[in-house]
């Protein structure tokens, strides 16, 4: 099974949330960027749209983040684009310490919602990121990101 199919299968139980915007005290530009994720079917995400609305990912509710995550990753694969700012954001979120007690609430609120299978599919996407050129990322960043997802997967196994 290819990475796109793995991501879609792993996240297939995610339902579209009723609320997409996590904070009502955001600027109009931030609201518009977030609405990109709400107004498009995730399978319609394009690298162009993600490039123009990359900062909307910060304002998504945790549930909306998990709902949109696979299609953001899939867009990068489908269009073979590893250098999107939104991808840099995702790698930046995952490139963190191996000590979960030091993880911030923004990260915990979103990434700890992933299931074991969702974590496995994100790891497969990270391996895809390492194929050929790693884009603007160093292998050490991608390795730490992979290790963070492994910790998330272990955490999910404790709570399943």
Image: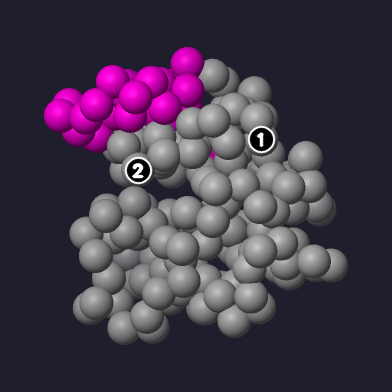
- Which residue in the protein does label 2 denote? 58
Residue farthest to the top, as pictured: 39
Vertical placement of residue 100 versus 62, above or below: below
Classify residue 131 as left or right of residue 86: right
Magenta-tinted stretch: 11-39
Q: Secondary structure at mark 2?
A: helix
Figure quadrant of residue 25: top left
Q: Secondary structure at mark 1?
A: helix
Residue 69: x, y in percent? 51, 43
Is residue 154 shown to the viewer in this render? no
Q: Earlier in the sequence, mark 2 or mark 1?
A: 1
Foreground residue among 49 and 66 = 49
Q: Residue at x 78, y 40 (%)?
A: 79
Residue 125: x, y in percent? 67, 58
- Which residue in the protein does label 1 denote? 47
Is residue 98 shown to the viewer in this render? yes
Classify residue 53 as left or right of residue 103: right
Residue farthest to the right, as pictured: 132
In 3D space, how far apart are the residues under numbered discs 2 and 1 (Cα atoms)? 17 Å
Whether the magenta-drawn stretch holds residue 46 is answered as: no
Rate crowding at label 1 as few (under 14), some (14 to 19) or many (20 or more) other CA atoms within 10 Å: many
Vertical placement of residue 44 versus 76, above or below: above
Foreground residue among 53 and 69 = 53
Which quadrant would the C terminus be assigned to in this image? bottom left
Figure quadrant of residue 17: top left
Q: Residue at x 33, y 29 (%)?
A: 30
Residue 118: x, y in percent? 53, 54
Classify residue 153 as left or right of residue 108: right
Vertical placement of residue 85 versus 156, above or below: above
Rate crowding at label 2 as few (under 14), some (14 to 19) or many (20 or more) other CA atoms within 10 Å: some
Q: Residue at x 52, y 62 (%)?
A: 91
């Amino acid at each position: 099974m290819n990475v796109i199919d793995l991501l879609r299968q792993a996240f297939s139980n995610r339902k579209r949330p009723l609320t997409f915007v996590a904070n009502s005290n955001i600027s109009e530009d931030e609201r518009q960027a977030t609405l990109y994720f709400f107004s498009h079917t995730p399978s319609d995400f394009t690298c162009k749209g993600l490039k123009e609305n990359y900062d909307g990912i910060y304002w998504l509710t945790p549930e909306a983040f998990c709902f949109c995550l696979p299609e953001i990753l899939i867009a990068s694969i489908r269009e073979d684009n590893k250098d999107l700012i939104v991808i840099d954001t995702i790698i930046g979120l995952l490139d963190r310490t191996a000590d979960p007690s030091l993880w911030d609430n923004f990260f915990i609120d979103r990434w700890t919602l992933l299931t074991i299978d969702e974590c496995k599919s994100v790891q497969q996407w990270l391996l895809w990121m390492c194929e050929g050129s790693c884009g603007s990322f160093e292998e050490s960043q991608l390795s730490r990101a992979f290790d963070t997802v492994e910790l998330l997967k272990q955490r999910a196994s404790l709570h399943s």
